[in-house]
């Protein structure tokens, strides 16, 4: 049996090699290149492919994979928003993802960024770099005094809630699918609007869907408390960036930590050589602000998470090839 892995980064390769050693019954091929129209032919002769990329898995690529007899595709990440679902269904292909490679990685990073915003570390780092060691006017807020609204209480949202509670914050949550334990604790509010109305901090952990595109728009911001903090480690499409910029300009939003950005594909995880060379003026506008923390989709990027992404995806693909079954099958 043969599995071909696309987009294997240098930090993933050692994990792929050790998985291959532990699974001598599988021939493992790999490339650094992403899966697209120009590389899909490399999968010929394989039983399954293992992939991770933010650029789309197009109908053309999926049709070609199927025509080569490759019916199993295993993602090394959680999000499945860039897959042409119709093409997958039409070709009778099966897709798995890794729903939980490390929810804690993302939760820990989200809270780190919130603490940086609340304690104004970006402001102080800049002041100190210029020899200004004064305190005022950059007085901080304490998380234990705030209400954190968690939008979506899946694995990542729940991992974040644990940490927020450890800090002594009041936590409220919204999700269409309620978690029974959290329900018992009475954290849920009934509508997103109620969450917006009550939260000092909004921590977003929802997957991207067609329905929730730009859910944080002018109207949503207008329903929030003045001086709210926005944390988005989830998907860029959830936030209308222009509306966020307006809300930052007006002071409605006191600060934002964005690990994702709606136009991040082709920009994040790229070295442009200088700040000026970053080819996105709107992103640069955000990065320049003292009260905005932009990071290039790194919340997931820990040793444990990367190892699990490779191992769990390879295990799932092998299981599909052997039995057509996997506990990580995705409903598209
Ligand atoms: C996902 O798993 O869907 C992520 O957002 C992390 C990705 C950058 C590897």
Image (cartoon, rainbow, N blue to C red):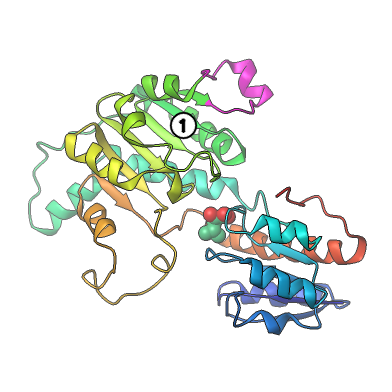
Total marks in image: 1
Q: Nearer the viewer, residue 314 or 141?
A: 314
Residue 98: x %, y % from top left: 68, 54
Taking the magenta stretch, the answer to whether it contains residue 212 is: no
Is residue 97 visible to the viewer in this orientation of the structure? no
Label 1 secondary element: helix
The answer to whether 314 is drawn above or below residue 196 in the figure is below
Q: Which residue is mark 1?
A: 164
Q: Is residue 161 left or right of residue 100?
A: left
Point out the stretch of residues depicted in magenta: 174-190
Q: Residue at x 60, y 63 (%)?
A: 306
| Residue 186 lies in the magenta-colored region | yes
Q: Position of residue 304 (x, y in %)?
A: 60, 58
Front residue of 143/242: it is 242
Location of the N terminus by quadrant is: bottom right
Crowding around mark 1 (Cα neighbors within 10 Å: few <14, some 14 to 19, many 20+) is many
Q: Is residue 172 above or below residue 128?
A: above
For ligand 1, give the image quadrant: bottom right
Image spot of residue 187 (x, y percent): 54, 19
Q: Residue at x 62, y 39 (%)?
A: 155
Q: Is residue 332 left or right of residue 120?
A: right
Across and down, in percent, residue 173 comes to 51, 25
Residue in view at x 73 percent, y 60 percent: 88
**Is residue 249 shown left or right of residue 186?**
left
Which quadrant of the figure has residue 12?
bottom right
Q: Residue at x 8, y 43 (%)?
A: 134
Side of 6 relative to 10 (left or right): right
């Amino acid at each position: 049996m043969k599995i071909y892995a696309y987009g294997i980064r240098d930090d993933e390769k050692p994990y792929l090699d050790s998985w291959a050693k532990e699974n001598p019954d599988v021939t493992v091929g790999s490339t650094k290149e992403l899966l697209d129209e120009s590389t899909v032919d490399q999968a010929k002769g394989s039983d399954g492919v293992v992939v991770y990329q933010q650029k789309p898995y197009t109908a053309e690529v999926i049709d070609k994979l199927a025509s080569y007899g490759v019916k199993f595709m295993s993602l090394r990440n959680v999000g499945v928003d860039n897959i042409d679902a119709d093409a997958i269904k039409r070709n009778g292909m099966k897709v798995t993802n890794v729903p939980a490679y490390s929810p804690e990685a993302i939760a820990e990073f989200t809270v780190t960024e919130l603490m940086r915003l609340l304690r104004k570390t970006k402001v102080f780092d800049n002041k100190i770099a210029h020899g200004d060691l004064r305190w005022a006017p950059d007085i901080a807020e304490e998380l234990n005094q705030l209400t954190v609204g968690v939008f979506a209480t899946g694995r990542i949202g729940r991992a974040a809630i644990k940490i927020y509670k450890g800090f002594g914050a009041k936590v409220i949550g919204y999700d269409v699918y309620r978690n029974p334990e959290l329900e018992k604790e009475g954290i849920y509010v009934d509508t997103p609007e109620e969450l917006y109305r009550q939260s000092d901090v909004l921590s977003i952990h929802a997957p991207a869907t067609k329905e929730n595109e730009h859910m944080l728009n002018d109207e949503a911001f207008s329903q929030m408390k003045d001086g709210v903090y926005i944390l988005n480690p989830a998907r860029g499409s959830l936030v209308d960036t222009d509306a966020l910029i307006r809300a930052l300009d007006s002071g409605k939003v006191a600060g934002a930590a964005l690990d994702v950005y709606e136009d991040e594909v082709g920009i994040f995880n790229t070295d442009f050589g200088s700040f000026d060379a970053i080819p996105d003026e709107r992103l640069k506008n955000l990065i320049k602000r003292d009260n905005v923390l932009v990071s290039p989709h790194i919340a997931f990027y820990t040793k444990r998470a990367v190892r699990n992404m490779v191992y769990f995806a390879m295990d799932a693909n092998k299981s599909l090839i052997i039995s057509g079954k996997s506990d990580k099958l995705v409903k598209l």
